[in-house]
Image (spheres, coloured by chain):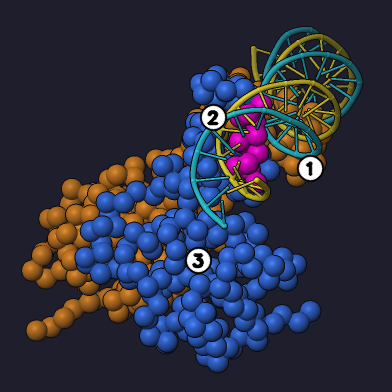
Chain colours: A orange, B blue, C cyan, D yellow
DNA sequence: CGGCTCACCCTACCAAGGTAGGGTTACAAT
DNA sequence: ATTGTAACCCTACCTTGGTAGGGTGAGCCG
């Protein structure tokens, strides 16, 4: 029996899927890589009798969809390692992926060499989760849980300050970091409060809980 | 500056602590290893100015103590990787350890070579958690990412108030809802702040972002 | 040009959050 | 019987957050 090295890439962005597919072929020695941009197509492409050696799954849609897909994939392909990718650096995402039983997690912006390493680990039956640096934590955005400042009707500066509020910074620190007076920060904060229809910064944070900025 | 490779081992079994300490010295190249068998002694041995390169923590007693200690260690030694060990193979344990923010987890009965590998990973800033067996997976999947008040070392009342803080309630409203004075609420809040090693309620919220209580 | 918004500055004021230092009760452990 | 801890109360004090009501200069638009 010929054991071809095959993979299935699931990502809603065709370009990304193509890019990853190509990378697996050229740098990881895969013989065949299928690329899927629609969850509907996943099951058509999977032949349970000869499952892929690896599944790469983007963590893009509202949590449920990708996690649910992950669960289904695990059930139908019990012996296939699943690598989940995300542009979102949030710890919570990785935790959920971990808890749901993926075999690995990697950030999209990670260097190619790291990617190769992770893939080879998964293929050898290991699990692999990334370290979270402080920078990673800050780089945000996964499509559904992200909100832009302009979507909230905020000015550029207000958006900048909103970001710092969400990190828990007090006005004084925001002022220092932006090299403006604390009073000016307060005025920007007041502007944000009015725009968002809330009474204080704590409500801003709880209102945007689970979402990410910019 | 001379950067010695130092470690702190926390285990209530003296023999185990000695064994692990010796192993770190002989097989992992540590220059100095402190061994503690009593949680009371932990803080005497830790010099925050020159923190250890690694902390090895046994998950021994009833959940509370070790997780609480873990939280405190993270607060005081933000840059030191913490490896939690356990003789208990239950997935839930690892899950909790992961959620509470340890950098790695390993079973005591694991082979020495694995131990070496895990330690070197942690020292290079990575996180490392063990693979899950199929039996363990089932229990893991159903578990949520939650943190209980007692795991944070909080009293019952403090936990109750923490929940309201996370909902964005101001002290006044908390007081009304619990039918106690606002001052008492403030004192509970202060207690929570100290336990969690932060300076104000906003930091509580940002610190627990994404986690659920109770 | 005038009218507009945005970013920035100021003083002054008040409310909310948090600390310090007192104290009382209840209840469990030594 | 004493110690310890949790929950509750108080006054007093300081810091932070937010509002109100002033003002300036830069830039855009009709």
Element under label 2?
A: loop
- Residue nearer the viewer, B169 or B8: B8
How far is the residue under mark 1 from the one under mark 2? 26 Å
Element under label 1?
A: helix
Q: Nearer the viewer, mark 1 or mark 2?
A: 2
Q: Residue at x 50, y 66 (%)?
A: B103
Q: Nearer the viewer, mark 3 or mark 1?
A: 3
Q: Are the residues under badges 3 and 1 in a single subunit?
A: no
Q: Which residue is mark 1?
A: A176
- Residue nearer the viewer, B49 or D12: D12
Q: Which residue is mark 3?
A: B103
The answer to whether residue B126 shows anywhere in this view is no
How far is the residue under mark 3 from the one under mark 1? 32 Å
Q: Quadrant of the N terminus of chain B?
A: bottom right
- Residue nearer the viewer, B41 or A54: B41
In the rendered structure, which segment of residues is drawn in magenta?
B183-194
Q: Which label is found at residue A150?
A: none
Q: Which residue is mark 2?
A: B168
Q: Please determine whether, in this image, residue B42 is positioned above or below residue B32.
A: above
Mark 2 nearby-residue class (10 Å; few <14, some 14–19, many ≥20): many
Chain containing the residue with disc 3? B
Q: Quadrant of residue B93?
A: bottom left
């Amino acid at each position: 029996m010929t054991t071809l090295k095959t993979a299935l890439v699931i990502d809603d962005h065709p370009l990304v899927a193509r890019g990853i597919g190509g990378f697996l072929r050229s740098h990881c020695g895969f013989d065949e890589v299928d690329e899927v941009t629609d969850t509907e197509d996943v099951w058509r492409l999977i032949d349970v009798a000869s499952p892929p050696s690896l599944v790469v799954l983007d963590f893009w849609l509202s949590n449920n969809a990708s996690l649910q897909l992950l669960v289904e994939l695990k059930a139908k392909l019990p012996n296939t390692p699943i690598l989940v990718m995300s542009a979102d650096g949030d710890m919570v995402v990785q935790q959920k992926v971990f808890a749901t039983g993926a075999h690995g997690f990697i950030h999209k912006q990670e260097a190619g060499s790291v990617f190769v390493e992770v893939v080879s680990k998964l293929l050898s039956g290991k699990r692999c989760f990334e370290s979270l640096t402080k920078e990673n934590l800050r780089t945000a955005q996964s499509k559904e849980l992200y909100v832009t400042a302009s979507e909230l009707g905020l000015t550029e500066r207000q958006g900048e300050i909103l970001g710092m509020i969400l990190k828990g910074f007090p006005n004084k620190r925001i002022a220092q970091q932006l090299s403006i007076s604390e009073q000016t920060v307060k005025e920007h904060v007041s502007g944000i409060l009015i725009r968002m229809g809330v009474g204080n910064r704590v409500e801003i944070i709880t209102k945007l809980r689970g979402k990410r900025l910019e």
